[in-house]
Image (cartoon, grey):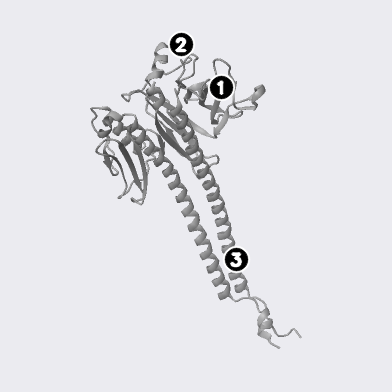
Amino acid sequence: MNKKNNLGFTLVEILVATVISAMSVAVVVYLYIFFTNSYKSLLDKAELSEFGRSSLTMISRDLRNAGYKDINYNQTWDRIIEQVDNYNNTGSDSLKIWYNNSPQDRIQIQYFLKKYDSGNEMYLAKDVIENPVTNPKYVYCERVSVQKNCSPLNIVPYVTDFQVILRDVDGKELRPVCATCSSAEGKENQSKVHTAEIYLTVRSSNEIYKSNKIVEIINHNSSTGNEKNLEDKYHRDTFYVSTYLRNIVKN
Amino acid sequence: MGETISYKTRGISIIEALVCVVVIGIGFIAIYQVTAFSVASLDRSIEKNKINFLSEMAVEDMLGDKVNIKNYSFSETCNHSIKGASNLSDEQKNKWRDKFNATNQIKINGKEKKPKCVSGDGKSANINSLGTSARFIYKSQKGKNAKYLAVGIK
């Protein structure tokens, strides 16, 4: 017989064990929440970074091609580049670029912000039309051959701002620059464009911060007063790229 | 039978339990450190993206003004104050300074989101004596990371 070993737990032992267990559980729960939130915020930031990088690389590549005219192209060549302020009342710009993608074909590429079907959130959309004047054909369609269910491509979700600044050879901002407008100055300015600057502000798809942040988006201090002020818990970053438009300058 | 408790069925002592808690705690601290490191790495990755675009901007500007390429020599550390400009190259360099400081882009709680710049960091543009090649170097992370971008000028 070993009486000592048959004794149960004392109240003090149970209390100590309960306190230690409670502390351990609390720490584990806290860490679980912390790690889950960190993981989500990591994913969101990684996504934001990837979208910013890939979209600006794509836009930059298209800008370098802007105005490229094949030596064998025999149609009227009056469209090169166009920038529109406050496109569709989004408070952001639209950018249109034209260039030859084959000796006989020309494409029109447009970048602009588009609202989702519900709510006020926007995404950066890309629309491509082959031979926009002679035989328009949208590229992003369910069935291209019959031009069925064509709609612009969502290339960056949750974009807060998209600004396009076009400058001449002396670094002065050009306004207006347009191909499809009635302004003679705007049409003439197309061939004066030397450099394009793009600002893209993207937000995380989920809320990241615990408290609201006051966000002021300026993206080029222009006379058009396109600043946006927001207050929320999302993470936002602005990406900027500047491209020399060699094919417009060459012509 | 069953009146004595063998060594194997005795359970764990409080000391053993505490040691166990401490060991698990150390494990959690390690994971916490790894998480913090990943968050910081991702922020650095976003910063590197921006650095790539800024370096491209400098090179594109130099390509756009080939005639005056020799005027584009540039070397600054963290202080990018705007200077007087009498020609295009000076204006372009002021533009670089503006973008290196992320001026007029985004403000969070009233503060501009400037790229980090510490001792050892810097940006420089070097043009060869013939004006046939240009190189832009953007150093970050105390000079440990350097983005090199070079172009031939025709």
Give the left or right position of residue A24, taking residue B8 as reference.
left
Give coordinates of residue B153: x percent, y percent.
Answer: 33, 34
> Which residue carries the number 3 mark?
A21
Amino acid found under the numbered disc labelled 2 = Ser
Residue B145, compared with residue B103, is above or below; it is below
Which-is-in-front pick, marks 1 and 3?
1
Give coordinates of residue B122: x percent, y percent.
Answer: 31, 45
Contact check, label 1 and label 2, Cβ < 8 Å = no
Q: Counting residues from the N terminus, which is met first, the one under dot 1 or under dot 3?
A: 3
The disc placed on residue A130 is: 1
Q: CA distance from mark 1 to mark 2?
A: 23 Å
Give coordinates of residue A212: x percent, y percent.
Answer: 48, 40
Seen from this angle, which residue lies furthest bottom?
A: A1
Q: Secondary structure at mark 2?
A: loop
Residue name at image x 35 percent, y 36 percent: B59
Q: Secondary structure at mark 1?
A: strand
Tell me if residue A233 can be seen: no
Amino acid found under the numbered disc labelled 1 = Glu
Amino acid found under the numbered disc labelled 3 = Ser
Residue name at image x 37 percent, y 28 percent: A221
